[in-house]
Amino acid sequence: MPTAREALLDAAYSALSRQPWTSVRMVDVAARAGVSRQTLYNEFGSKDGLARSVIRRAADGYLAGVDRTLGADRRQGDGPAQLARWTVRAAGANMLVKALLTGVWEDRALDAGALATGRRSVPALPTPGELLSLVRDRAVAALAGGSPPHGPAKLELRCEIALRLAVSYALVPADPATGRAPGDRVAQCEEPDNWRPITPMTTREIDTSLSVETTSSRKTMP
């Protein structure tokens, strides 16, 4: 059974999925969670505190998924592609994860930058660049144990490219019916009828992109 805090976070996210944050009332969130409004304020301090905690939970859930994806059972060779797949799926399933990764906030009242400060009990919210760097570094740490053939610098670049490809896909997802991005008029090569985002076909394309050698001395993408 969820705790009062978890129930409040669930209620707040549910409300946000139906209306702008500015229209969400604390009394309604408390009622949906089955607790008093005073309990809500005791837990989060304010509406901004609640917002920070909802976003923080989304970020923590995404990072937990990253750790599962990069578990010890994953081979180093497909680790970056698996990371890209998880990132796209997480962004598609949770609008807050998508906003954290892309910096595109449909409800500006929930902009992570505007909520960067607040109660000490809630860690600061990461910017998209900070989140991508954190995930990239976690990926390298998890996968480097397998003695990557091209060294840690190559692995770092592969992980960064995978993440940036995933964020691009999250921003402009393909149409599941056609496999093409919205507005794409190219019709010569139709995808199979059973195409779905991030299929083995997509994974192969990601792996191909990641296998391209680079002569740049930079370790990160611009």
Image (cartoon, grey):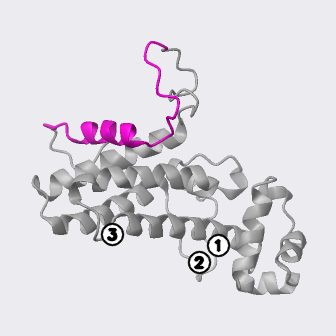
Q: Nearer the viewer, mark 1 or mark 2?
A: 1
* Residue 80, position as x, y percentages in the image: 30, 52
* Residue 3, position as x, y percentages in the image: 71, 86
Quadrant where the C terminus is found in the figure: top left
**Residue visible at 39% across and 69% down in the picture:** 67
User: Is disc 1 in contact with disc 2, using a CB cutoff of under 8 Å?
Assistant: yes
**In magenta stretch: residue 175:** no
Find disc 2 in the rendering and name its residue: 122
Q: Amino acid at mark 1?
A: Ser
Q: How crowded is the residue under tag 2: few (<14 C-alpha within 10 Å), some, or many (20+)?
A: some
Question: Between marks 1 and 3, how big is the CA–CA gap?
Answer: 27 Å
Label located before the other in sequence (1 or 2): 1
**Secondary structure state at the residue bearing disc 1:** helix
Find disc 3 in the rendering and name its residue: 71
**Secondary structure state at the residue bearing disc 3:** loop
Find disc 1 in the rendering and name its residue: 53
